[in-house]
Amino acid sequence: MTRLASEDDFLAAIDRHFTNAHPHLCVGRGDDCAVIACPPRMAVSTDLFNEHSHFRTSYFSPGDIGHKALAVNISDLAACGARPLGFSLALTAPADLSREFCDEMLAAMAALAREHDMALTGGDLTRGDALSLCITVWGGPAPRPAPAAVAEDGASPFLRRGGCQPGDHLFLMGRAGLARVGLLALESMGTEAARLYPEACRAHLRPRPQVAAGLALAAICGTGDARIALLDVSDGLARDLPRLIGADRGSGLGAELAMDPDAQPGEVRAYALANDLDPVDMAFTGGEDYALLGNCRPAMLDAVRAAVPGLTLLGQVTADGVVLVNGDLPASAGFDHFSG
């Protein structure tokens, strides 16, 4: 292993993996600032991805780290119905970070960026006690099929949380609980977990942002009864559902969810059975699935299901301020980074 000797070593690694030309870059990396050809409206999001808090190098490969650091940010764009365009990367690196580690990490990040045609606009590098990646992503609205455009620029609207009403439908794109199983298995078994729970480990290590689903819903969304609310499920349904319906902001709304234990992902059911756990509780409370939780008026449901085949209907919004899962109060409120 060869240690990164200087910032120039890191910049050379960046140049090996990322092109410096992109339709939305007027001036790319190498100057004090990049110059971006901005769309009229932009969606912007930033996430930290820190060693010990968000990942462990004992079972995350360098490629897993690079992929997931960018994927969790892209998932925020997906929840807005935004088309990913570019990102910047700030890296805090320990003194012993090797060129080989850096190359593998950046190669996986670059592969995901190419998949979504994203430019790397620049960033920063500093030394620290542990590895930390801070990524800021930006995206634009997708073109909207005529004649349904409602935005002044003729593009799809960005989707937002809130605006829910009693009787609205709740739905999920992606699979809940798998990433939680992957985390618990990897924490207890290390890399052996991948043999017993391969899908769950992939869900935790290399999540797949639901960009296509977000764009498809933005394309059919409008105002009034055609409005769709959407949210990126990073902290688990237990935490994120109240945010979608505005219960955390005093909306007074609740929800009734119907989650069939036998309909949960196979590895969630297998892990729950092996560890005397409830698969529905695993799916409801488990975080880091990077699925999309959505809401729509009853009149929009057929259009939503046509736009995103395979989505899962979860239940309905209620007016009583209580969240029920299969008729009962949830056993857990889910994970909070700042609790305990």
Image: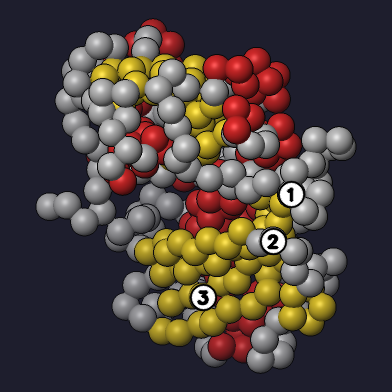
Which one is in front, 280 or 18? 280
Display colour scheme? secondary structure
Instruction: Evaluate whether residue 17 shows in this view.
Output: no
Displayed quadrant of residue 164: top left
Which residue is located at x 76 percent, y 64 percent? 39
Which residue is located at x 74 percent, y 75 percent? 36
Instruction: Evaluate whether residue 222 shows in this view.
Output: yes
Disc 2 residue crowd, few under 14, some 14–19, many 20+, Cα 10 Å:
few
Disc 3 residue crowd, few under 14, some 14–19, many 20+, Cα 10 Å:
some
Q: Position of residue 62 (x, y in %)?
A: 50, 59
Displayed quadrant of residue 255: top left
Q: CA distance from mark 2 to mark 3?
A: 24 Å
Q: Are marks 1 and 2 in contact (CB under 8 Å)?
A: yes
Q: Position of residue 257 (x, y in %)?
A: 35, 17
Between marks 1 and 3 in the image, the one whose residue lies nearer the viewer: 1
Q: How many marks?
A: 3
Q: Counting residues from the N terminus, which is met first, the one under dot 2 or under dot 3? A: 2
Q: Position of residue 78 (x, y in %)?
A: 60, 45
- The amino acid marked with disc number 2 is Arg
Q: Residue 41: which numbered mark, if any?
A: 2
At numbered mark 3, what does the secondary structure look like: helix, strand or loop?
strand
Between marks 2 and 3 in the image, the one whose residue lies nearer the viewer: 2
| Residue designated by label 3 | 90
| Residue designated by label 1 | 151
Above or below, comparing residue 1 to residue 223 in the picture: below
Q: Counting residues from the N terminus, which is met first, the one under dot 1 or under dot 3? A: 3
At numbered mark 1, what does the secondary structure look like: helix, strand or loop?
loop
Which one is in front, 33 or 250? 250
